[in-house]
Amino acid sequence: ARKKGIPRVYIACNSGARIGGVEELKSIVQVEWVDSEDLLKGFKYLYIPDADMQKLPPQAVESHAISVNGETRHVLDAVIGAGLASTKGGVGVECLQGSGLIAGETSRAYEETFTLSYATGRSVGIGAYLNRLGQRNIQMVHGPMILTGAEMLNKVLGQQVYTTMDQLGGPHIMVPNGVTHELVQNDQDGVEAILRWLSFVPENVLTIPPMILPRDPASRRVQFTPTKSPYDPRHMLTGVNVDGEWQAGFCDDGSFHEYLAGWGKSVVVGRGRLGGMPLGIVAVETRGMERRIPADPQEANSSDVVEIQAGQVWYPDSAYKTAQAIRDFNHGEHLPLLIFANWRGFSGGTRDMFAEVLKYGSMIVDALVEYKQPVTIYIPPNGELRGGAWVVLDPKINMEQIEMFADVEARGGILEPPAAAEVYFKKDKQVVEMMHRCDDALKQLDIRQAKGEDVASEIKQREKLLLPVYQQVAWEYCDLHDRAPRMKSVGAIREGLSWAESREYLHWRIRRRVQENGVARKLMRAVSGMSYVSAMQVVTDLCRKAAAVAGVEAEDRAVATWIEENRSEVQLRIERERQRATEEEVYRLVSSLPAARRAEVVRDLFGYTRVAAKAGGPTSGMA
């Protein structure tokens, strides 16, 4: 799969590394007892009589010979089994070596191509690790993933604790901990899940994900609008029936499929389509969620633990889930990424700091830094992106790939208005000053006080009466700083969008970037050492005429369409750039030679090209 750059699907059902012994020795091995009359005193060593030893292959065992009462005994130092039939295929560490080989290959495969595992039956030991090393997992309800069987654990614990393998690695363990991406009921559903996932994946690592004929035109309006009150973010993506009327969501009808649904529930991740174009999608849960930690049967006093998680907040598990999903979209899938960013920040309490929220939040940045496909951050209507949550998504993390947009009804800033007002208005000190500047009654009282009248109590009463109203004024003033026009003015976002029309705009914007990115990657493969910035300059030059003719409003659509319809011209330009770079490299290499050698090398090169041209070699088509 790595060599060909094609998807790798692993159907998992195994019992782990094989364990066994050398069967041929069982019937001939002898025991030397400490006291043959009292076997409970133990034994001294195991040995093989000389006559039996002579029948074994030379490398069957390692031993040393001793003589006991005139009998030659071969005391066993190690059992090897070389040359014996029972060891064929391995019985011990050689099986672990093979397991390590598979593990290393699986890890490399995830980095280089698309990997997917389907646990159709039990997966034990290295079998379970292989599923995790491939990262993406579909689990059948009767396919537990475990490290050690229940019976073995019971022996270690010295009591009957576990009765089934499902207690150790069944769906109720592997779905909530994020190892399982999708749970299916049977193999029919499992194969369907594999095919659905593959439909989002490019045929090989050198191509872009497949576009299909859309169920919805990209121009279709988005009808479901996110509200300020908590809502199910899946409705925003898929649509929902409200009072008997269907309100369409952002994705093409029926195209969004959620993964990792049971883990890190404050974040929703999945794959969907926008006008037939595949996307990796991350959205935010605005409702409160529960995280359940099951009791451990081996601890008599343990019980289920339930943790409440607020909406619009990253917790350790949901931050890790976000980073994992981004890595999966990038590795092998090559999906453009769309993040509906609606986070108030990270949970920074003692328990969550201890649970490594800082580490997992940093992993989001790491995943975005290495992202090789277009990334679109969109703050949805009535959504907000604050503080540290903004920082880990900011376009400057990966300026080559990340663009940020905000809905005209969205907000972005360091703090929410009430908290910002506390800082900006000096804990209401400047709010009171605003009252005296704007309120006519307070103006009159200030005039009377300036004349020497004792109106301090009236002023205090008026200030107390107006404080709640003027606090709202202060909040509104702070809120005005967090809107799309200011974000665009300072270069924090590319554009403010209207939610209802966002499908068409983002479809063509992302589609253009996907096509441009694809050409740039081809250029970088063809021209060794070419940077992404240099490759994009070539792409821009290639599409300059199409962009100029279309104008600013239709530029994205024109460029995307031109690249898709002019593959031969694009390939010709890539070849010209490759030849230009080759010529420059030849000149550079020749110029690095001593002056006395340059003429000889040029003469040899000239002779080679003449011979190659006559033979119809690789240089015959070059000018």
Image (tube, grey):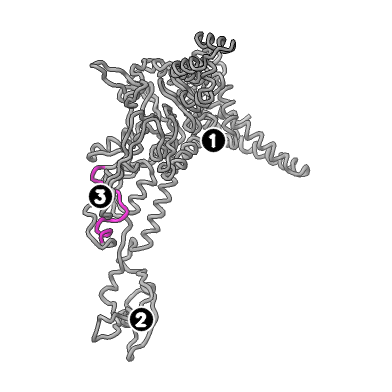
- Residue at 46 percent of width and 42 percent of height: 359
- Residue at 41 percent of width and 54 percent of height: 101
Q: Are marks 2 and 3 in contact (CB under 8 Å)?
A: no
Question: In which quadrant will I find the C terminus?
Answer: top right
**Mark 1–mark 2 distance (CA, rounded to whole Å):** 63 Å
Q: Amino acid at mark 2?
A: His
Residue designated by label 1: 525
Residue 151 is covered by the magenta coloring: yes
Q: Amino acid at mark 3?
A: Gln
**Mark 3–mark 1 distance (CA, rounded to whole Å):** 49 Å
Read off the magenta span: 140-154
User: Does residue 95 lie above or below 55 as drawn?
Assistant: above
Q: Secondary structure at mark 3?
A: helix
Residue 557 seen by the camera = no
Q: Picture quarter containing residue 449?
A: top right
Q: Are marks 3 and 1 in contact (CB under 8 Å)?
A: no
Residue designated by label 3: 167
User: Does residue 510 lie above or below 65 as drawn?
Assistant: above
Q: Nearer the viewer, residue 208 or 614?
A: 208
Residue designated by label 2: 74
Q: Nearer the viewer, residue 588 or 344?
A: 344
Q: Amino acid at mark 1?
A: Arg
Question: Which circle's residue, 1 or 2, is located before the other in the chain?
Answer: 2
